[in-house]
Image (spheres, helix red, strand yellow):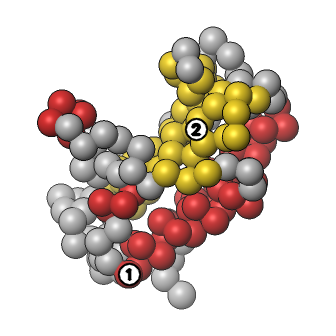
Amino acid sequence: MNAAEQATSLELTTKIASVVTLFKAQFPMVRVDLKPWSNDRETRSQLDPDSIDIGFHLPGWNPKYECRSMLVQMRFFTGGNFTDGNLTDGNSPRLIGLEVLGFSYNGEQWRLSTVGDWPVVGEKRPAEEKLDLLKTFCRQVYELFNSPPR
């Protein structure tokens, strides 16, 4: 679901803002889109209510990224209810996976998944140095959501 719609508590809103900050630390030129999905009936029927999705747009197509836009999809195990936004109780959502997808005007170009051995699949792949930055970002997001409360 759109990150803007999942920001239902101060804590969850803060964590979403932290994800944006972490991404922009690796890729400072991006423009953030907290509502990457359309609000039509067909699109809404396809959305995962246990995910937070954020779009990031580059100034233009870039050969090092092999894309124009990136979609970050964070998937959570919620134990049933994500809508209260409470990340500190015993039933708080736990991040179980991330997918980062690269899009150009020709559609999806590549996909990085943190499931398994973190494969990158697609017709085109970003340069290794950009993949390393994406993987660093993914590790930081895991730490943000899954580290014990202080």
Residue 67 rendering spot, x and y as whole percentages: 66, 28
Labelled disc at residue 60: none
- Tag count: 2
Pick the residue in front: 137 or 90.
Answer: 137
Q: At x 15% / y 36%, what residue is drawn?
A: 41
107 left or right, relative to 38: right
Rate crowding at label 2 as few (under 14), some (14 to 19) or many (20 or more) other CA atoms within 10 Å. Answer: many
Which circle's residue, 2 or 1, is located before the other in the chain?
1
Q: Which residue lies furthest to the right in this view?
A: 129
Residue drawn 32% across the image and 49% down it: 1
Tag 2 residue = 70
Q: In this view, does 109 lie to the left or right of 5?
A: right
The amino acid marked with disc number 2 is Met
Q: What's the CA distance linking mark 2 and mark 1? A: 26 Å
Residue named by callout 1? 10
Q: Position of residue 147 (x, y in %)?
A: 54, 71
Q: What element carries label 2?
A: strand
Foreground of the two, 36 or 74? 36
Image quadrant occupied by the C terminus = bottom right
Determine the residue located farthest toward the bottom in the rendered image. 150
> The disc labelled 1 sits on which kind of residue?
Leu
Q: Residue at x 58, y 46 (%)?
A: 56
Q: What element carries label 1?
A: helix
